[in-house]
Amino acid sequence: MYLCIKDQIQNLNIVIGCTVGCDYCYARNNVRRFHTIEDFSNPQFFESKLRLFDNKIPHNFLLTGMSDLAGWKKEWIDMVFEKIRQNPQHQFLFLSKRPDLLNIETDLQNAWFGVTVTRNSELWRIDALKQNVKAKKYHVTFEPLFDEPKNPNLDGIDWVVIGTMTGTQKNKVHTLPSWANNIKDVASAKNIPVFFKEDLVPIMGEENMVQQLPQQFLDVLKVQYATKNK
């Protein structure tokens, strides 16, 4: 049986909007459909959602499901980091496609900073992340993949996620099994946990699904499960 990543990591969209402009962006389409904000290219900060960080039951939270960390204002980052520091029971994840625009230094133990890589020509993002974000934990998401990222430098990376394009876009490009397996092999050689997203099941076959989570995430889920089943 395979896992759905949204059951392991919950979206907490404290910022909505992004300036990157990917043509396959599901978040922009959702905003247009539900009119969450007026202009997706003008990110908006929902400060009232900071109270959700105070949940005493541990969670793994993705904070950039509908934004890019590079589009956050410094004052937003400062407020969010302070709340993260006050809530060590959670793990918090960030993603960016423009790590070259970031300038962050933090000693937060429960904040994970990552980049999205969609093709071989974007592998520079991994090194830029480590150069521009001085942090304790790093991760990389390879999704959607338009070609094979060859021999990614995963030194210092703590988690790797691999997926494929979803939705109803024309000219959809699917991740090839060889691409996913080659990235997995590079990560596994460095003892980095790898998670194949559930959308890869039709491509990889359920028997070939690799779904590993960092121990910190597993610890959160263990407490969640115990709390729900008291």
Image (cartoon, grey):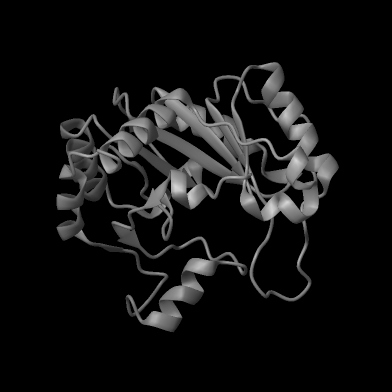
Q: From the image, which quarter does the C terminus lie in?
A: top left
Residue 69 is left or right of residue 202, and the answer is left
Q: Residue 172: where, in percent of width, then height?
A: 76, 67
Q: Residue 162: where, in percent of width, then height?
A: 65, 43
Q: Residue at x 62, y 45 (%)?
A: 2
Q: Residue at x 53, y 41 (%)?
A: 115
Q: Residue 95: where, in percent of width, then height?
A: 46, 45
Quadrant in the rendering for residue 168: bottom right
Look at the image and tell me whether residue 228 can be seen. Answer: yes
Q: Residue 105: where, in percent of width, then height?
A: 33, 28
Q: Residue furthest top?
A: 190
Quadrant in the rendering for residue 178: top right
Quadrant in the rendering for residue 31: bottom left
**Number of numbered tags placed on the structure image:** 0
Viewer-nearest residue: 146 or 41 = 146
Q: Is residue 44 above or below residue 37?
A: above
Q: Residue at x 54, y 66 (%)?
A: 21
Look at the image and tell me whether residue 146 can be seen. Answer: no
Q: Is residue 172 above or below residue 209?
A: below
Q: Residue at x 58, y 30 (%)?
A: 127
Residue 206 is left or right of residue 138, and the answer is right
Viewer-nearest residue: 3 or 81 = 3
Residue 188 is left or right of residue 114, and the answer is right
Q: Is residue 141 above or below residue 32?
A: above
Residue 148 is left or right of residue 14, and the answer is right
Viewer-nearest residue: 48 or 188 = 188
Q: From the image, which quarter does the N terminus lie in?
A: top right
Viewer-nearest residue: 87 or 19 = 87
